[in-house]
Image (spheres, helix red, strand yellow):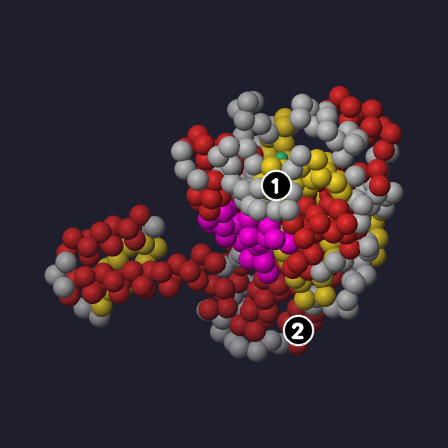
Amino acid sequence: MKIYNTMSKKKEEFVPLEEGKVKMYVCGPTVYNFIHIGNARPMIVFDTVRRYFEYKGYDVNFVSNFTDVDDKIIKKALEEGVSADEISRRYIAECRKDMDAMNIKPATKNPLATEEICGMVDMIQTLIDKGYAYEKNGTVYYRTRKFKDYGKLSHKNLDDLQSGGRTLLVTGEDEKEDPLDFVLWKPKKEGEPAWKSPWSEGRPGWHIECSEMSKKYLGEQIDIHAGGEDLIFPHHENEIAQSEAANGKEFARYWMHNGFLNIDNRKMSKSLGNFFTVREISEKYDLQILRFFMLSAHYRSPLNFSAELMEAAKSSLERILTAAENLKFLAGNAATGEMTDEERELYGKSQEYVDSFERAMDDDFNTADALAAVFDLVKYINTTADGTRSKEYLDSLHDRLYQLTDVLGIIIDRQEEILDDEIEEMIEKRQAARKERNFALADQIRDELLAKGIILEDTREGVKWKKA
Ligand code: AMP
Ligand code: ZN
C-alpha cells in the first residue's frame, strides 16, 4: 500500500509503527460557523482513508480535534453577545450533524482544545526547559532557529522565510528574538476566555493544540498526520518543531494533504459570493452526492465544484443505487435458492473488480480509479443479474457491491432500511393516537408520511402502506 508523503514528496510503502495498527490525526475545523464545503473535503477524504485501512484489517485509532478557542470564535461571540463557549458548542453540534449526513464515521476521539489546556501548558514548559521557547511579557514564543529541521515538511529555507518574515512582523511582536519565532501562549485581552499558566492568564496558540492532543491520544509518534494543503505551512511545520523538540523523536511517519476545493474555478470566498456551507448544499442535494462528488477526483488534485458537476455526480450515483435496488428486488423474487455451478463461476469472475478496486486504493487512495472499478462491477451486475438467477447469486453480488461502496462510505440501501422502520414506527404512533381519539395527531402523522411519499390505506386487515 503506497501513500504520498508530503515530507519526502514521494509515494512510499506504508509500514505501520505497530503491526496491524494505524494511529492517525486529522486537523479538524475551527468551530465559529457552519462548516463549508471546503472543510468537508478533508473530512470525506480522510474518513475514506480510515475506512480502507479498516477494510484491510487494520485497527485504526482516528483522532480529530475541534479548535474551540480562536479569534474568530471570540469575534462571533462578541457580535452575538453570547459566550465563546456557546458559539463553539453550537457549531460543534451542527458540524456533527453534517458529518453524520456525509456518513463520516465517528472518530475514536474528538478532543476539544479547551479541555486540554493543562497538557499544552506542560508541553510549553518542556519546550522552555529544553531551550526551545522563551517568555516575554506573558507571551511565550518558540525559538524557531533552534530547531535544526525547521522547514523540512514545507521544503522552505529558513533564510527565505527570514526575508519574508520581517515584513510580516506586526506591532506588539517586536519583542520577539527573531521574526521567525511563533506564539505558544498569549496573554488574554479584555473579555477573552483565559486559563491560568506560569506566564500569564491567557490561551494557547493554535499550533500547540494539535501537538498536545495528538500526543495525549495517540502517543509521541504517530503513523499519519493529515489535513488540507494550506496547513502544511506554517501549521504542520510548527507542529513538527514543537513535538519533535519536546518529545525527542520523529512526530509522524506520513504527512497527507488534500488539495483545495474551488467553486466554478475560483477560490471559494465570502467576498466573491461563491461560498457554500454543507448545510446549504444539503437543502438541494442528499449529502451522499457531495461525498460521491468529492471522491470522484484524486484527493491531492484541486477539485472544482459546480452545479453541473453535482448533477453529473447525482446521476452517476443513481446508477449504483439502481443496480443495488434491482439486486434486492430480484433476490426477493428469486425462484431458486442456491447458486448453480455456472453462477459460481460468474461470481468468481466478479473478483476482478475487487482486485482493481484494491489496486487503485493501494496506489495512494486513488478513489477516482476505485470508483471506475465500482462502475465496472455495476455493469457486470446489470448484464448478469436477471429474474432467472438464484437468490444466493444475487445476494452475493449485492454483498460484493456493498463491500466496495462501504469503503467509500457510500450507502447503497440506507433509504429502504431506515425508511421501513421509520414508517412502521409512525404508523404505530398514528394507531395509538386514533385509539385515544386524538384524530388531529393521527391526521398530522398521515400527512407527514404523505410528504415523504408514503400513502396509507386503512383496510379491514389493518393499515397498509405504499410508496407514491
Ligand atoms: P479550518 O477550519 O480553516 O482550520 O479548516 C479545517 C480543514 O478544512 C483544514 O484541514 C483545511 O485545510 C480544510 N480546508 C479549508 N478550506 C478548504 C478548501 N477550500 N478545500 C479543501 N480543504 C479546505
Ligand atoms: Zn492541527
At 69% from the left edge and 56% from the top edge, which residue is drawn? 215
- Residue stretch in magenta: 92-120
Ligand 1 shows up in the quarter that is top right
Report x, y in % for residue 169: 72, 25
Residue 344: numbered disc: 2
Which residue is under mark 1?
A: 200
Crowdedness near tag 1: few (<14), some (14–19) or many (≥20) residues, C-alpha within 10 Å? some
Report x, y in % for residue 199: 65, 42
Mark 1 secondary-structure assignment: loop
Task: Say if residue 459 shows up in the picture.
Answer: no
Q: Does residue 420 appear left or right of residue 214 in this picture?
A: left
Residue 147: numbered disc: none
At 67% from the left edge and 37% from the top edge, which residue is drawn? 139
At 12% from the left edge and 61% from the top edge, which residue is drawn? 437
Q: Does residue 298 appear left or right of residue 401 in this picture?
A: right
In this view, the residue in front, 208 or 464, is: 208
Say above or below: 90 vs 79.
below
Amino acid found under the numbered disc labelled 1 = Ser
Amino acid found under the numbered disc labelled 2 = Arg
Report x, y in % for residue 236: 73, 43
